[in-house]
Each structure stands twice: as C-alpha cells, then as structure tokens.
Amino acid sequence: MSICQIMCGALASVSGCRLEQLKDETISAAHISFHFLWRRVLQPAGELPWRLCRGDIRQNLEELSKQEAKPAEPCTAQLWQLMREHKYPREQLIETVECFAQCPWATLTAEHQHGSLSALHKWHPDYGTERLVSRAMLHGMIRVLSSVSDTEKANAKIAKHVQIFDRKNLPKHAAIT
C-alpha cells in the first residue's frame, strides 16, 4: 500500500465516508472546478478581443484587418473599422491591444461596487433604485481618484523636518518669510 493510499484512507475515515466515495467526489469536484474556470476565464480569453493579445499582436491585427466582414464583438469591430476604413496608425492600435492585456480579470471591482451599494442601502433604506445606484457609483469613484502615495507622504514628512531644522538654525537677525 502506497503512502498516497494510506493518506487517502485516513482522510476518508476522518470525513466519515468510504475511500471510493471520497475519490469519486474529489474527481467530480475537480471536473466542476475546471469547467467553471474554463467557462469563466479560459474560453473568454480565447475569444475576441482578448485573442488579439496572445502571440504577435501586429500579426493578429493584420489578420483582423484582412477579414471581409466586420466582427460582431464591438471593441474588435472598432479596431477593424479603424484599420480598414480610417487607415489608423498601427502602432497606436498595437498599444491599444496591449492595454487590453493589462485589464484585470478579478472580481474585486464588482465586490467594491456591491459593498458601496450595500452600505448605502443599509444607512438609507428609503432611497429608490436610481438614487441608490447613482450615489453608490459616486462612492465607488473614491477608489479611482488619485491619492497621496507612500513615497509622497515620506517626502512631505522629510520636507517638514527640513523646514523645522531650517527655522531652528536661522540666524536671529534674518527675516522670516
């Protein structure tokens, strides 16, 4: 009996099920997890416009521009139109596609929006849908606005200390501005 079989048997006994049942349920859970990942991440990443980000972007755009029909996907359709009808500079379009590659695939933004909406609804249950959504959107914009970085805070602190030091070492007859 291998160490893996021993560990699986111990895990099955702790969980209160038979080893065969544990194996079946584990494989089933792995299939479900993979299908979810495939459906939500891998399959969309293989479609337009994300497909343009993989491999040689210049070549991908060249192939897109050679298509006779305008793509159904709106973003890709605009790229196609810029290349075919407006002869837009390829370098700028390549940079645009590179920006696609920088888009996060996380749900954090949606979670933040939900949190803003939930907090507002908790404190203002009398708000209607339109007011609630518009105020939640404004609350969510706080994350977009620029804030003071850690480096800027450190620089401001140093500048304040230098200013205090200069005041202490200023000759008594010098004018203070």
Image (cartoon, rainbow, N blue to C red):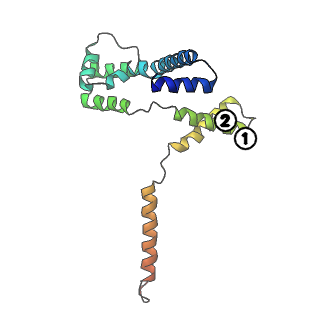
**Front-lying residue, 41 or 80:** 41
In the picture, residue 125 is in which quadrant?
top right
Q: Which residue is mark 1?
A: 123
Where residue 155 appears, as percent x and y from the top left, is 42, 63
Q: In the figure, is residue 143 to the left or right of 76?
A: right
Measuring 30% from the left and 28% from the top, which residue is drawn there?
93
Q: Residue at x 42, y 73 (%)?
A: 162
Judge whether 118 appears above or below 57 on screen.
below
Q: Where does the image place residue 40, in percent across and percent down from the top left?
A: 48, 21
**The C terminus: image quadrant:** bottom left
Identity of the residue drawn at 36% across and 30% down: 101
Work out whether 86 lies above or below 169: above
- Is residue 29 depicted above or below 104 in this figure? above
Residue type of the residue flagged with mark 1: Trp
Can the viewer see residue 3 in this picture? Answer: yes
Crowdedness of circle 2 by 10 Å Cα count: few (<14), some, many (20+)?
Answer: some
Q: Under tag 2, what secondary structure?
A: helix
Looking at marks 2 and 1 on the same chain, the residue that comes earlier in the sequence is marked by: 2
Q: Position of residue 160 (x, y in %)?
A: 46, 70
Q: SS at mark 1?
A: helix
| Residue 118 disc label | 2
- Residue 147 left/right relative to 61: right
State the residue in front, 40 or 22: 22
